[in-house]
C-alpha cells in the first residue's frame, strides 16, 4: 500500500520534515513501512535549461533543432513544440528519464538529427495538465539546477507492507487514522453534501439481490449527462502520487475514492445495461464472461456475478466486464458500492487467477458501513467534475445487516496476558484513540464496540493486541516465566542423528544437505525396478521445476549430483554423507511414510599423494570399514555383511555390494555404484556408498553401558593359516570359531588373504589370529595348543581345507 | 696384587673423562657397576680382608659405587646433550601427515547452537512429519481455507488436503493434542515454500518454540527472546518488538535486531532500515487452544519461530541462501 504525505495531509496535518519519525511510528504500531521514496524521484534527470538558439530541422518542417545550455555544457535537442523561443528557460529531460506515463527517454536521432534530450511540457512531466507546449520556467532559475530542486518539488511516499488482518488500512484515510492515534489528534473526514429531496433513482433502475449470503449489501447511484474527459490536475496528481495512472474523470474518480476510503467502486455505462437494472446472482453453469482485460472466463455456479436484465456485466468485486465498461461516449453512469463476502471473493479470484485492487480489499473485508459514504463521495465528484447531473436518491439493498460486535474486556486478564499494569482509563484512552467505543461495566470490565471498519476485531484477545501495540511493545516490561525444572527425553532419533553426524565427521566425511525433492526420472537413473517401493513417489502438484517435482525416495541421487557438482569444480576426492528423510507414498490421500536414512559416499582417493606417502585409492573395503566402525561406535554388535544377491540392488555393481544385517534384521547396504548409474549421473569416476535406516538401527541402540573388568592375566595369540576354496566367504571361517563358544577365546580376526604363487588355482589362503586368555590364571602353552589344534582340525574338516605346505 | 678401592675409583673417573661417546660410557658403566663388574667383584672379595678393615673398606666401596653411578649418569647426559646438538635436523616446515576430519553442515551447527540455548532455557525437543495434513499445517493453527493469511506462505501441495509443511508450527498442535500443560517444546526441522531467489530456497530450516502454562505473559515472551538473541548473537545486540500478524498468535510480534552488518547505519542487507527481522512470535491464539481442547481461561502460551538459514547467513556473512544446498566442498569446509 502506497501513501503520499501530500495526500495524507488532506485529512490530518503532517509535518513533512518529520517523515522518518512518522514512518518509524507506523512500523511500531504494526504498519511496517517497507520503503520511503520521493514521488518526484523520476525527475532526477530533468534539468533547468536555456534555449540558446533555434534552427529549422533540415528534414522536417514542424520540428526545430535547438542548442540548449544545461549548465555544464550545451546539448542539441530536437523539439516540435510551438511555443519555444530563444532565451527561453525550460525543463530538459536527459536520456535515462522515465516519464510518469511510462516511456523511457533514450539518446537518439529524430529524422536524422541528433537529439540529446527533450524539452518537456507540464503534462509530460506529470506536473500539470498543459500539454500544448514546453513548460515555461522563470528566467531567474539557475541553469543546470535539477528541476525538482528549482521548483521545490518533494512528496514523500511510504510503501507500507500491510498484514492481511488490516484491510482498514488499505486506504489513505485508514493510514491517516493510525497516524491520528499515534499523534493523538483527530482526522478530518472529507465532506459530502448531497441533498436527496426525492427518490427519483427508482424511476430509472432497480436492484435485486438473489445471493444475499455472498452479497449482504449493494448500493447504487446514477449520474446522467456526464462529459467524459481528463480529470482536473489535482485529481490526477493525487492518483499519480501513489503510482496510479490517470485515465478519464469517471475511472479516476472511482480509483480516487477507492484509494481514499478503501471501498472499491464500479462505474457501469448505464445505457449498456439491459433493462437498466442490476441483478446480483450466482453464475450459471457453463456461462462465460469477458472481463475488462479482454480475457474470457468460464464461470462456475459458486461465482457471484453482477448482471443486468439478461446477462452478467461484472465479476462481483473482482473486475468489470467489457460489455458494460465506461467509454468515451458514455453519458449515463451507474455507480456500484457494495459489500461482498470475503470468502466468496477469494474463492473466485483464486480460481480465475485474477488479483485486482478491488478483490484484494473485498477478500480481506471492507467496511460494511462505509459503503454509502464512498458512494456519495464518488457521486458528488462525478457530478462536479464530469459536469453531470446527479439523479436524486440512493438504492441501498442491505439484506443481511452486519452487526457491530460488543466485546467484553477484562482489565485483569489483559494485564495478565501482556504482563502489564494498565488501569481502566489507560485502556479506554488507547482504544478511543482508534475510534473504539468503550463503556465501563462492573469492577474490572469494559464493553467495547469496535468501529465497523475494524473487521479483524472479534474477541477479547484482539483488543488486548490493540492495547499492546498502541502503548508500544517496547514499553511492556520484560519478564521471565517461572517454570518447573522438568525435562523430557528428546525423541530417540534426535540423539541418534546427532551422534551419527559427529561420528561421520570424525571419519573425515563432510555433511551435505540436499533438497528433499528430486526429479521424477531419478528412479530410472538408479535403474530401480518397476516394483521397487522407491518408485512410490510423492508428487508435488505445484513444483517450481521438473528437477524438484517429487519427494525423494532415496538419498543417493542427491549425493551423486553433489559429487558431480564438486568434481566439475576439480574437487575429485570426496567423502560426503547426509542424514535425512525419504518419503514413500501411501497413496494420494494419505501421509507418506517418512523414513530417516543415513547415506555416505566415497570417491577419488582415500588419501592424496604427499611427500611421505603415495596416493591411496579407495575401494569397497574403505566404505565397509566406515560402516563397521560406525556401528561399532554405536555399540551395535552381531553385524554381518553378506553378498547382495544379484538384481537385489540395481544401482550398485553386482558382486561388489554387501547387504548388512544385525542378526537376521536387514539394516542397510554398502557397495560400489553401478557403472550404468555412474553414466546416468554423468560421472566418470567410481564411487562407493552405504545406506542405513535410522528407524531400524535406533532399535538396537542401548542407552545403558556396563563396564567390564580389565583382564588381570596375560594373553596368548596363535595364528592359523588354511587354504580354502576361492569362492568361500571368509566370514564362514570366523562363524565356525564363534559357534564354538570357547570361553578362553578372547578375540579372533582375519589378518591375511593370499592367492596365487604357491597357492593352487581356485584356492586362497586365509590367516586368522586367535587370542586366548583366562579370567582366572595365566594360561599354559599346552592348554592353548589343545584348543588351537581343535579349531584347526575343525576348519580343515568343515571346509575341506588344507594347511600350507 | 689387587687394586685398592681408591685406585679403582681414580681409574674409573679417568676413563669416564676420556670416553668420547655414549656407547663407551655404557660399556664402562657395565664394566664397573654391572653384575660382573669391578666394583661388584671388589665387594665380593671384601671377605678376604682382615675383619677390622672390612667395615671401613666396605663402606668406602659402596660410596665409590654411588659416586661412580652419579658420574656415569652425568657423563651420559653431557654426551647426549652434545650429540643431540650435533645430530641431523628434520625439516620441520614440511607439512604434517594429514588428519582427515569432516565438516558438519553450517545449518546443523547453527541448529545445534539454537537448540542448545533454548534447551538451557528449559525447552524440550519435539519433531513431526514434513509432509503434513492441511489440518495440522493450517486449519488447527487458525488459518482457514480461503483466508488471505494463506498467501503469507507459498505452499507446495501434494493433494487438496496434504501439503509440505510451511512451518514447524504444525508440530505445536500435534504435541498439544498429546500433552497437558505445562508444555514447552522447540521443533527444529525442514520446511518448504515455493519461492526461490537470493534470500529464499524452496526448502529451508526452522526452529519453532512453544510454551504453555498458567500465567505465561507477553513480557515472558520478550524475556525469553531477549535472552536467546543475546546468546545466539551477543550481549550487545539491540532488539525491538513490533506488532505483526500471524493467525495462530494474538498479539503477534516481529522481533528485529540492529543490523549486524552495518550496526544500524543502514545497508543492503537490512534494506537501509538498520533493522533485521529475525523472529516471528506472539501469544498463542485462543482459537488454537480451543482446537486442542485446552482451557483458554486457565492457560496462556507463547510461541516463536525463526529461520535457521537467516541466522546462519547473518552470523557467517553469507549473501546467497542457495549456497547451503549446493554443497560445494569449498563452502562447507569453511565452517
Ligand atoms: Zn544493515
Image (cartoon, coloured by chain):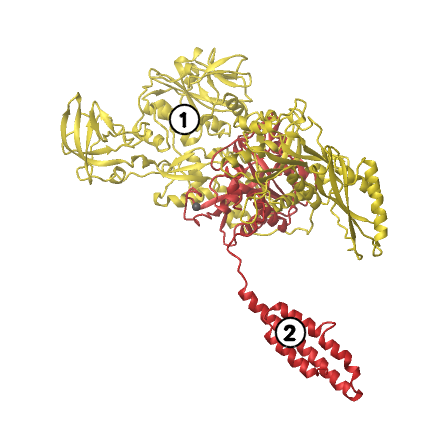
Chain colours: A yellow, B red
Question: Who is closer to the viewer here, B178 or B7?
Answer: B7
Element carrying mark 2: helix
The x and y percentages for residue A700 are 74, 41
The x and y percentages for residue A736 are 81, 39
In the visual, does A722 lie left or right of A187?
right
Residue ID for mark 2: B72
Labels 1 and 2 within one chain: no
Residue ID for mark 1: A376
Q: Is residue A370 visible?
A: yes
Residue at figure coordinates x 63%, y 78% from the top left? B13
Question: Who is closer to the viewer here, A101 or A589?
Answer: A589
Chain for mark 2?
B
Question: Who is closer to the viewer here, A376 or A67?
Answer: A67
Labelled pair 1, 2 in contact (Cβ < 8 Å): no
Element carrying mark 1: helix
Chain for mark 1?
A
Quadrant that contains the N terminus of chain A: top left
Quadrant that contains the C terminus of chain A: top right
The x and y percentages for residue A336 are 44, 21
Q: Is residue A449 visible?
A: no
Q: Nearer the viewer, mark 1 or mark 2?
A: 2
Residue at figure coordinates x 18%, y 33% from the top left? A68
Say the numbered circle drawn on residue B188: none
In the visual, does A772 lie left or right of B121?
right
Residue at disc 2, CB closer than 8 Å to ligand 1: no
Check disc 1: other Cα within 10 Å, few if <14, some if 14-19, many if 20+: many
Question: CA gap, disc 1 to disc 2?
Answer: 119 Å
The x and y percentages for residue B172 are 64, 39
Whether B334 is drawn above or below A48: the answer is below
Amino acid at each position: 500500500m502506497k501513501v503520499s504525505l501530500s495526500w495524507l495531509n488532506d485529512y490530518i496535518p503532517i509535518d513533512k520534515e518529520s517523515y522518518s519519525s512518522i514512518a518509524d511510528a507506523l512500523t511500531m504500531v504494526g504498519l511496517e513501512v517497507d520503503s520511503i521514496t520521493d514521488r518526484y524521484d523520476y525527475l532526477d534527470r530533468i534539468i533547468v535549461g536555456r534555449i540558446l538558439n533555434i534552427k529549422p530541422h533540415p528534414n522536417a518542417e514542424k520540428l526545430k533543432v535547438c542548442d540548449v545550455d544545461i549548465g555544464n555544457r550545451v546539448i542539441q535537442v530536437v523539439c516540435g513544440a510551438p511555443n519555444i523561443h530563444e532565451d527561453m528557460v525550460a525543463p530538459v529531460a536527459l536520456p535515462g528519464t522515465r516519464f510518469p506515463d511510462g516511456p523511457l527517454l533514450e539518446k537518439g536521432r529524430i529524422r536524422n538529427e541528433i537529439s540529446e534530450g527533450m524539452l518537456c511540457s507540464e503534462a509530460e512531466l506529470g506536473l500539470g495538465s498543459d500539454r500544448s507546449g514546453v513548460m515555461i520556467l522563470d528566467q531567474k532559475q539557475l541553469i543546470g539546477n535539477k528541476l525538482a530542486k528549482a521548483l521545490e518539488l518533494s512528496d514523500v511516499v511510504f510503501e507500507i507492507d500491510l498484514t492481511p488482518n488490516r484491510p482498514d488500512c488499505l486506504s489513505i484515510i485508514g493510514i491517516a487514522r493510525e497516524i491520528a492515534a499515534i499523534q493523538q489528534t483527530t482526522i478530518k473526514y472529507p465532506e459530502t453534501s448531497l441533498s436527496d429531496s426525492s427518490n427519483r433513482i427508482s424511476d430509472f433502475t432497480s436492484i435485486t439481490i438473489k445471493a444475499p449470503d455472498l452479497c449482504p449489501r449493494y448500493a447504487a447511484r446514477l449520474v446522467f449527462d456526464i462529459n467524459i474527459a481528463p480529470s482536473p490536475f489535482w485529481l490526477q496528481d493525487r492518483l499519480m502520487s501513489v503510482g496510479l495512472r490517470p485515465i478519464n474523470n469517471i475511472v479516476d474518480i472511482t480509483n480516487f475514492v477507492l484509494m481514499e476510503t478503501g471501498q472499491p467502486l464500479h462505474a457501469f455505462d448505464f445505457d449498456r445495461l439491459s433493462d437498466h437494472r442490476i441483478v446480483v446472482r450466482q453464475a450459471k453453469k457453463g456461462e462465460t464472461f469477458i472481463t475488462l482485460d479482454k480475457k474470457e472466463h468460464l464461470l462456475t455456479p459458486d461465482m457471484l456475478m453482477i448482471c443486468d436484465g439478461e446477462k452478467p456485466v461484472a465479476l462481483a468485486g473482482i473486475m468489470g466486464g467489457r460489455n458494460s465498461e465506461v467509454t468515451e461516449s458514455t453519458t449515463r453512469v451507474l455507480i456500484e458500492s457494495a459489500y461482498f463476502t470475503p470468502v466468496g471473493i477469494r474463492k473466485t479470484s483464486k480460481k480465475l487467477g485474477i488479483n485486482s485492487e478491488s478483490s484484494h480489499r473485498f477478500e480481506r473485508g471492507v467496511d460494511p458501513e462505509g459503503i454509502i459514504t464512498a458512494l456519495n463521495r464518488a457521486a458528488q465528484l462525478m457530478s462536479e467534475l464530469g459536469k453531470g447531473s446527479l439523479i436524486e436518491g440512493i438504492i441501498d439493498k442491505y439484506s443481511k445487516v452486519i452487526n457491530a460486535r460488543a466485546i467484553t474486556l477484562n482489565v485483569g486478564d489483559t494485564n495478565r496476558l501482556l504482563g502489564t499494569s494498565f488501569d481502566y482509563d489507560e485502556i479506554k484512552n488507547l482504544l478511543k484513540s482508534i475510534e473504539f467505543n468503550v463503556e465501563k461495566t462492573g469492577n474490572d470490565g469494559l464493553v467495547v464496540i469496535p468501529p465497523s471498519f475494524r473487521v479483524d476485531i472479534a474477541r477479547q484477545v484482539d483488543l488486548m493486541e490493540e492495547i499492546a501495540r498502541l502503548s508500544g511493545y517496547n514499553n511492556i516490561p520484560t519478564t521471565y516465566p517461572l517454570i518447573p525444572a522438568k525435562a523430557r527425553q528428546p525423541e530417540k532419533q534426535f540423539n541418534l542423528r546427532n551422534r551419527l553426524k559427529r561420528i561421520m565427521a570424525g571419519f573425515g566425511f563432510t555433511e551435505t544437505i540436499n533438497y528433499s525433492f528430486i526429479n521424477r526420472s531419478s528412479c530410472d537413473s538408479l535403474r530401480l525396478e518397476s516394483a521397487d517401493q522407491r518408485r512410490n513417489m510423492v508428487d508435488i502438484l505445484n513444483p517450481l521445476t521438473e528437477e524438484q517435482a517429487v519427494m525423494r525416495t532415496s538419498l543417493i541421487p542427491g549425493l551423486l549430483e553433489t559429487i558431480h557438482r564438486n568434481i566439475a569444480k576439480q574437487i575429485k576426492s570426496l567423502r560426503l554423507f547426509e542424514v535425512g528423510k525419504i518419503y514413500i507414498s501411501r497413496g494420494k490421500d494419505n501421509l507418506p511414510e517418512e523414513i530417516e536414512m543415513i547415506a555416505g559416499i566415497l570417491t577419488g582417493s582415500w588419501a592424496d599423494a604427499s611427500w611421505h606417502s603415495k596416493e591411496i585409492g579407495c575401494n569397497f573395503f574403505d566404505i565397509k570399514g566406515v560402516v563397521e566402525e560406525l556401528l561399532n561406535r554405536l555399540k551395535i554388535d552381531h553385524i554381518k555383511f553378506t553378498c547382495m544377491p544379484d538384481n537385489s540392488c540395481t544401482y550398485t555393481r553386482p558382486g561388489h555390494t554387501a547387504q548388512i544385517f544385525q542378526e537376521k534384521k536387514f539394516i542397510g547396504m554398502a557397495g560400489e555404484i553401478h557403472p550404468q548409474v555412474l553414466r546416468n549421473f554423468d560421472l566418470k569416476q567410481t564411487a562407493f556408498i552405504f545406506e542405513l535406516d535410522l528407524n531400524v538401527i535406533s532399535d538396537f541402540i542401548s542407552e545403558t553401558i556396563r563396564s567390564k573388568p580389565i583382564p588381570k592375566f596375560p594373553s596368548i595369540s596363535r595364528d592359523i593359516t588354511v587354504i580354502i576354496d576361492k569362492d568361500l566367504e571368509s566370514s564362514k571361517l570366523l562363524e565356525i570359531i564363534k559357534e564354538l563358544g570357547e570361553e578362553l577365546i578372547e578375540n579372533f580376526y582375519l589378518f591375511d588373504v593370499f592367492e596365487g604363487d604357491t597357492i593352487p588355482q581356485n584356492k586362497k589362503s586365509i590367516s586368522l589370529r586367535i587370542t586366548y586368555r583366562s579370567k582366572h590364571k595365566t594360561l599354559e602353552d599346552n592348554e592353548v595348543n589343545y584348543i588351537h589344534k581343535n579349531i584347526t582340525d575343525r576348519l580343515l574338516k568343515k571346509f575341506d581345507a588344507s594347511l600350507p605346505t | 696384587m689387587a687394586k685398592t678401592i681408591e685406585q679403582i675409583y681414580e681409574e674409573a673417573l679417568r676413563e669416564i673423562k676420556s670416553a668420547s661417546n655414549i656407547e663407551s660410557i655404557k660399556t664402562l658403566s657395565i664394566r664397573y657397576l654391572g653384575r660382573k663388574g669391578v666394583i661388584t667383584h671388589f665387594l665380593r672379595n671384601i671377605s678376604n680382608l682382615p675383619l677390622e678393615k672390612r667395615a671401613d673398606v666396605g663402606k668406602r666401596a659402596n660410596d665409590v659405587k654411588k659416586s661412580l653411578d652419579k658420574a656415569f649418569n652425568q657423563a651420559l647426559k653431557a654426551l647426549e646433550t652434545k650429540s643431540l646438538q650435533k645430530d641431523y635436523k628434520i625439516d620441520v616446515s614440511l607439512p604434517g601427515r594429514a588428519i582427515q576430519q569432516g565438516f558438519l553442515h553450517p545449518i546443523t551447527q547453527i541448529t545445534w547452537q539454537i537448540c542448545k540455548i533454548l534447551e538451557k532455557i528449559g525447552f524440550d525437543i519435539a519433531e513431526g512429519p514434513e509432509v503434513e495434513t492441511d489440518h495440522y499445517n493450517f486449519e488447527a493453527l487458525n488459518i482457514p481455507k480461503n483466508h488471505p493469511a494463506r498467501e503469507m506462505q507459498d505452499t507446495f501441495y501434494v493433494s487438496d488436503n496434504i501439503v509440505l509443511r510451511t512451518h514447524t508450527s504444525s508440530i505445536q498442535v500435534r504435541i498439544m493434542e498429546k500433552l497437558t500443560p505445562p508444555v514447552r517444546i522447540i521443533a527444529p526441522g525442514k520446511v518448504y515454500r515455493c519461492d526461490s531467489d537470493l534470500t529464499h530456497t524452496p526448502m529451508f530450516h526452522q526452529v519453532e518454540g512453544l510454551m504453555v502454562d498458567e500465567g505465561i505473559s507477553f513480557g515472558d515472551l520478550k524475556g525469553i527472546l531477549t535472552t536467546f538473541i543475546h546468546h545466539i548473537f551477543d550481549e550487545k545486540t539491540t532488539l525491538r518488538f513490533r506488532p505483526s500478524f500471524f493467525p495462530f498468535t494474538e498479539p503477534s510480534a516481529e522481533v528485529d535486531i540492529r543490523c549486524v552488518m552495518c550496526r544500524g547505519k543502514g545497508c543492503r542487507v537490512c534494506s537501509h532500515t538498520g533493522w533485521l527481522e529475525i523472529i516471528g512470535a506472539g501469544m498463542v491464539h485462543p482459537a488454537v487452544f480451543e482446537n486442542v481442547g485446552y482451557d483458554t481461561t486457565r492457560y496462556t502460551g507463547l510461541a516463536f519461530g525463526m529461520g535457521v538459514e537467516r541466522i546462519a547467513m547473518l552470523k557467517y556473512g553469507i549473501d546467497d541462501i542457495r549456497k547451503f544446498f549446493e554443497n560445494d566442498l569449498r563452502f562447507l569446509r569453511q565452517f
